[in-house]
Image (tube, helix red, strand yellow):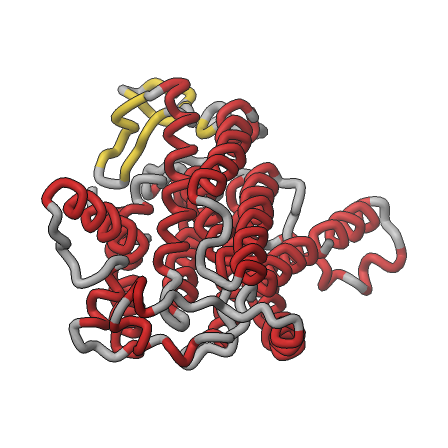
Amino acid sequence: MLYAIFKIWEKAAANGADWAEGFSFLRIFQYITVRAGLATVISFLLIFVFGPRVIRKLISLKVGQPIRTAEEVHKLAELHGDKAGTPTMGGILILGAVLLSVFICGRPFNPFVAVTACVMLSLGLLGFMDDYFKVVKKNSAGISSRQKLFWQLVIATFAACFIFFKPEVSGFGGSAPGFSMKVAQDGTEVAQHFAISEISFPLVKQPFLDISWLAIPFFMLIIVGCSNAVNLTDGLDGLATGCTITVALAYALLAYIAGNHIIGFDYLNIPFNPLLGELTVFLMALVGAGMGFLWWNCHPAQVFMGDTGSLAIGGALATAAICTRQELLLVIIGGVFVMEAVSVILQVGSFKMRGKRIFAMAPIHHHFELRGWHESQVIIRFWTLSIIFAIVGLGLLKVL
């Protein structure tokens, strides 16, 4: 909306309209940094203002979070017993704030913004159905694991195909629309091209592997894996929300850099696409929404995001990582999410193969709870790790 206003002013100014000079301040809406900042503030304020009303509505609808019984989780039931009845489905606040902020401040039809927003909305709807069935059945089962995985794969397939086949998205460097990158090579200028199927990493100056059409299942794996990893992390008050802020902020910076050929390609030698900078607005809206939701989600939480929020956030972050061509860096920047997912895989694998558990309980944040850490200690220490992981990931951009 704001960018459209700028374009109207720009056209009027070019045609010499009388009113254009008096509204010259509208030119600031062309800048991504301005609109990203506004998106952050707007999404935060939307949740801050409307959060109490939504929470009261969820309470009136009796959509309380079902807590697993002592037979299922033993001592953890004692630690989390007071959480029973806390309203869930709070992820609708995040979804609404992000999408509305992007509509106001961003360019929603930008292909990178569109695919990320569609993945977020689709997985959010899937999570909403899961939360709904949990509330209706009054247990923590929800949609069956197979059904959930099936629909995650369907959503991820559409997103991966869009990214792979859409020229405006898959074009980087010389193939990017409206841009012809020239680099000096032995005194000769040549067009620089990056394929979306080429895997890159900051420590390697050139893409080191082209996986061709296998990029589609690779992207699907990232989207489904990250979606479930965030979902596993969402087990303590504010834990997933705080880590989301850190990861989204890091990828907002990466998106801005990748959309600027001077900083991104010339200096840092990372894949460039002129349309990618707009994704910064979406990610900063997610940062603002995370901050706003954390206001109500911090310990002791007044609302949980539920699968409505966690599945959507994970999918959005994964899609952003793929779009910025820094999907491998997500393993570092999203280190806490990776820890949580790997702990579950190791726990299940060890129990099935050896009949023994590695951790007191998985995901790993529950392990530390059962080892005597207070919930707030686990949360803040994991937030600290998330910040460190993000700094390390961004620091790798200029190692070589």
Instruction: Say which quadrant the C terminus sits in.
Output: top left
Q: What percent of the width, then of the height, locates residue 258?
A: 43, 42
Name the spot of residue 274 as percent of width and height, x first. 53, 38
Image location (x, y in percent) of residue 290: 49, 66
Asked if 293 appears above or below 339 in the picture, the reply is: below
The quarter of the image holding the N terminus is bottom right
Furthest-front residue in view? Answer: 71
> Quick one: 294 or 140, which is closer to the camera?
140
Tell me the residue at 61%/72% (across/down).
62
Name the residue: 21% across, 77% down: 373
Report the number of discs. Answer: 0
* Depicted 380 relative to depicted 124: above or below: below
Residue 275 image offset from top left, x and y in percent? 55, 39
Residue 346 appears anywhere in the view: yes
Instruction: Check the image and report above or below for 278 versus 45.
Output: above
Residue 243: quarter of image = bottom left
Q: Residue at x 28, y 55 (%)?
A: 340
* Residue 239 or residue 117, whichever sits in front: 239
Residue drawn at (44%, 36%) of the image: 272
Residue 299 drawn above or below residue 210: below
Camera-nearest residue between 19 and 311: 311
**Quarter holding residue 371:** bottom left
Horizontally, residue 365 falls left or right of residue 327, namely: left
Q: In this view of the protein, can residue 278 be seen by the observer?
A: no
